[in-house]
Image (cartoon, rainbow, N blue to C red):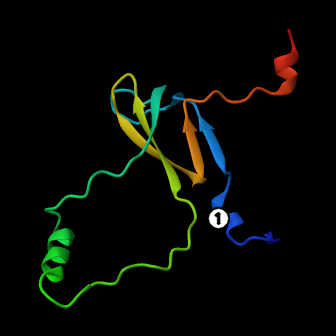
Amino acid sequence: GTQVCADPGEALTGPTMVAIPKTRNTFCPSKKCGKHTLHKVSQYKKGKDSLVAQGKRRYDRKQRGFGGQKKPVFHKKAKVTKKVVLRLECTKCGYKTQQTLKRCKHIEIGVEKKKKKSEAVAF
């Protein structure tokens, strides 16, 4: 069946906080490795926009002179969160892969996962 949420945005956001360790043992698809190795985990960040990209050159040319804003400016923002992308770097060969996670509001890298109460008491 279909799941009904009280808040329509609730289904999109997923968990509010995700904790991820700094290293993870996962498959490296490079020709050097081709097996599970240790990877350094970091969060993907968008690079600086290039001024010489064709779209930017075209936009700047169009914007010149009189006549105000020439292209539409997006206002109907519907999403509350962005999908998180992890950047995994192999410690053996340096090969970098990316992995997309679900939407979440907050991510912490390098945090130990909370132990269950039954494990913490046993001493």
Q: In the picture provided, is 16 more to the left or to the right than 69?
A: right
Rendered residue at 13%/62% (across/down): 52
Amino acid of disc 1: Leu
Q: Quadrant of the C terminus?
A: top right
Where is residue 65, by image quadrant? bottom left
Q: Nearer the viewer, residue 2 or 31?
A: 2
Tag 1: Cα neighbours inside 10 Å, few (<14), some, or many (≥20)?
Answer: some
* Placement of the N terminus among the 4 image quadrants: bottom right
Q: How many marks?
A: 1
Q: Nearer the viewer, residue 105 or 23?
A: 105
Q: Is 105 situated left or right of 7 in this image?
A: left
Above or below residue 73? Residue 18 is: above
Q: Which residue is mark 1?
A: 12
Residue 36 visible in the shown view:
no
Q: Is residue 122 left or right of residue 76?
A: right
Q: Position of residue 71 (x, y in %)?
A: 28, 84
Residue 23, image x, y percentages = 51, 27
Give x and y (percent) for residue 100.
51, 50
Residue at screen point 87% across, 17% down: 121
Residue at 82%, 19% in the rendered image = 120
Q: Secondary structure at mark 1?
A: helix
Question: Between 63 and 6, which is closer to the camera in this rendering?
Answer: 63
Q: Residue at x 45, y 79 (%)?
A: 75
